Image (cartoon, rainbow, N blue to C red):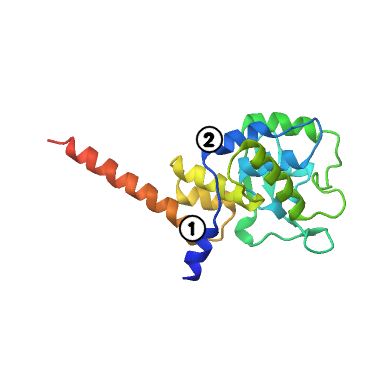
Amino acid sequence: MENMKKLKKVKFINQFELHTLLDTLELKNEISWEWMILLIAKTGLRFSEALALTPADFNFSRQSISVSKTWDYKGEGGFLPTKNQSSIRKVQIDWQTVIQFSQLIKDLPEDKPIFVKGKVYNSTVNGVLERYCKKAEVPVISIHGLRHTHASLLLFAGVSIASVARRLGHSSMNTTQKTYLHIIQELENRDVDLVMRSLSGLS
């Protein structure tokens, strides 16, 4: 029962809604919460992982971001270890993100978090995201909902559960399966239809 309650709370938006949302972001020439929203939508990072990113974590030639720490936004600030060992990972990013971020962070100190200026509250970023959701006329989701959106889009696109688990930094595929059970079931139904169609073509 507890799990069902949790599942009902998983809020994510579909691909069209995400495109609409990202199109409304006012992306300026300097780092802002809008850029963080874009980055989490494209990488599925946890909020604390995105906050801990420093310029040194970006490897533009390899098109990847290195996730090895989190930011203590609930406490005094400062770097903390990742949620678990599996959370230490490299996340591939697309060329567009490489070009955008290489410009944005080129003059920033290598070892300082790019998004943190003073005390950070996730309610601040959720407030910014809510404003854009309303402006884009899509369902209001939280920053964590962007992570769910990222994962669900990958699953719908046919990316394997193992790859999605690795990208999200889940400690096991079970976590991914439990969290995205409804999507996985929908995909399995789609697979059954495919199998039946393929079989009916055999004579």
Residue labelled with disc 2: 16
Q: Secondary structure at mark 1?
A: helix
Residue 32 picture quarter: top right
Q: Is residue 61 in view from this perspective?
A: no
Determine the residue positioned at 44% across, 57% down. 181
Which residue type carries mark 2? Answer: Phe
Q: Nearer the viewer, residue 60 or 176?
A: 176
Q: Is residue 49 in view from this perspective?
A: yes
For the residue carrying disc 1, how many other residues have a C-alpha within 10 Å: few (<14), some (14-19), or many (20+)?
some
Q: Is residue 60 left or right of residue 112?
A: left
Determine the residue positioned at 74% across, 32% down. 27
Q: Nearer the viewer, mark 1 or mark 2?
A: 2
* The C terminus sits in image quarter: top left
- Mark linked to residue 42: none
73 over 195 or under it: above or below? below
Which residue type carries mark 1? Answer: Met
95 over 139 or under it: above or below? above
- How far from the left and from the top, in percent, is residue 131? 70, 43
- How far from the left and from the top, in percent, is residue 191? 32, 45
In the current view of this chain or complex, which residue is farthest to the bottom? 1
Number of labelled discs?
A: 2
- How far from the left and from the top, in percent, is residue 170? 56, 57
Determine the residue positioned at 56% across, 50% down. 148
Q: Is residue 132 left or right of residue 149?
A: right
- How far from the left and from the top, in percent, is residue 107? 86, 34
Q: Disc 1 and disc 2: Cα gap in Å?
A: 27 Å
Residue labelled with disc 1: 173
Determine the residue positioned at 71% across, 50% down. 126
Q: Is residue 186 left or right of residue 43?
A: left
Nearer-N-terminus badge (1/2): 2
Q: Is residue 127 left or right of residue 139?
A: right
